[in-house]
Amino acid sequence: MILANKVRLKPTPEQESQLWKSADTARWAYNWTLARQEESYRNGKKFIPDRSLRKELTQLKQTAEYSWLYDVSNNVTKQAVKDACDAYKQYFKKLSDKPRFKSRKRSKPTFYNDNVKLKVKGDSVLIEKVGWVKTAEYLPDAAKHINPRVSFDGKYWYLSVGVEREDEKTNWTGEVIGVDVGVKELAVCSNGMVFHNVNKTKVVKKTEKRLRRLQRKVSRQYEMNKEGSRFVKTCNIVKVENRIRLLHRRLTNIRKNHIHQATAAIAKTKPSAVVMETLNIKGMMKNRHLSKAVAQQKLYEFKRQLQYKCEKYGIRFTEADKWFPSSKTCSDCGQFKKDLKLSDRIFKCDCGLKMDRDVNAALNLAKLAN
């Protein structure tokens, strides 16, 4: 299977300037492709293949107005065009939402580097039009690095590459684990493992409190420096916004690290199968009282990580049907309790069963693998 390796880059100021230029060019090429597809649709024409757009972009580069595209590698723009076209194809297949234009302020700066031209030598990597860049750790030796991407997370630059590895030989325990995910707890397993909601910890609450204070502060500064209908961004505003960006990065890293630890703990028990609950996330996000808590849990990221870690160890991964009544069904006698409310945290059945509703749901999910 192909596993990703992500290493931090240590560019010089000149190299970092070139990295930003490549990321901005990739964003421009992506937005240019979306604009061309939208224009074609408005004129009643069909979807434009990426090979046609790449030829058009090559001709565009030869004009004086777009000669700045030569400052970065041609693979950066070519892959950005292909990514935009692939996003449209996913939309046509109803596998994703309609692709949107990338914002300079909100989108993640990233670009593609040709895997053939990516060279690794000790603690340095060769990136096109950037040069040899130092890395914080060694990249694994591989005959071929798959889909290299350079990205910026708000503080550091990273290089992520896919490396093909052999599947690990695993001695399974024969156990089947049901995983019930939710808002109260991140995950409750049928074998007794419970992974708490990291958003309720002191570290996250303290960080969110600091974030709210800085957001109010920068809002006041914008109002103080308002000139008519125009907001003026001062140097002090830029400093506060940088601190806000770093706090957002810290919160993201805390949540992602917690999910990595939880999914790794489940996969390392080496069961023969894992059954996970499928929640109606879109429906839950429409509830204004619940939407923020659901978004912070990163349930899709939890499923994605658990799925590839199960594949790594050869564990069978199954997703239950979205409307399977795991919480309202008795795990002992199978009786369906229609009047169970969300506020009822203890499941009580006429057969005498009395247990936590999440544990009961996890036990019901585990039975689906049989």
Image (tube, rainbow, N blue to C red):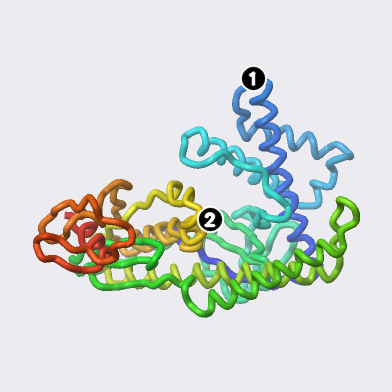
| Residue situated in front as seen by the camera: 90 or 70 | 90
Q: Quadrant of the C terminus?
A: bottom left
Residue 205 spot, x, y in % from top left: 54, 75
Residue 164 visible at all? no
Residue 295 spot, x, y in % from top left: 50, 58
Q: Are marks 1 and 2 in contact (CB under 8 Å)?
A: no
| Residue situated in front as seen by the camera: 197 or 43 | 197
In the image, 191: left or right of 334? right
Residue 74, compared with residue 358, is above or below; it is: above
- Give the residue at mark 2: 146
Q: Quadrant of residue 239?
A: bottom right
Residue 43 spot, x, y in % from top left: 68, 21
- Residue type at mark 2 is Ile
Tell which circle, 1 or 2, labels the residue nearer the N-terminal end: 1
**Residue drawn 76% across and 71% down?**
240
Foreground disc of the pair 1, 2: 1
Residue 165 spot, x, y in % from top left: 42, 62
The disc label shown at residue 44, or none: 1
Mark 1 burial class by Cα count in 10 Å: few <14, some 14-19, many 20+: few
Q: Quadrant of residue 224?
A: bottom right
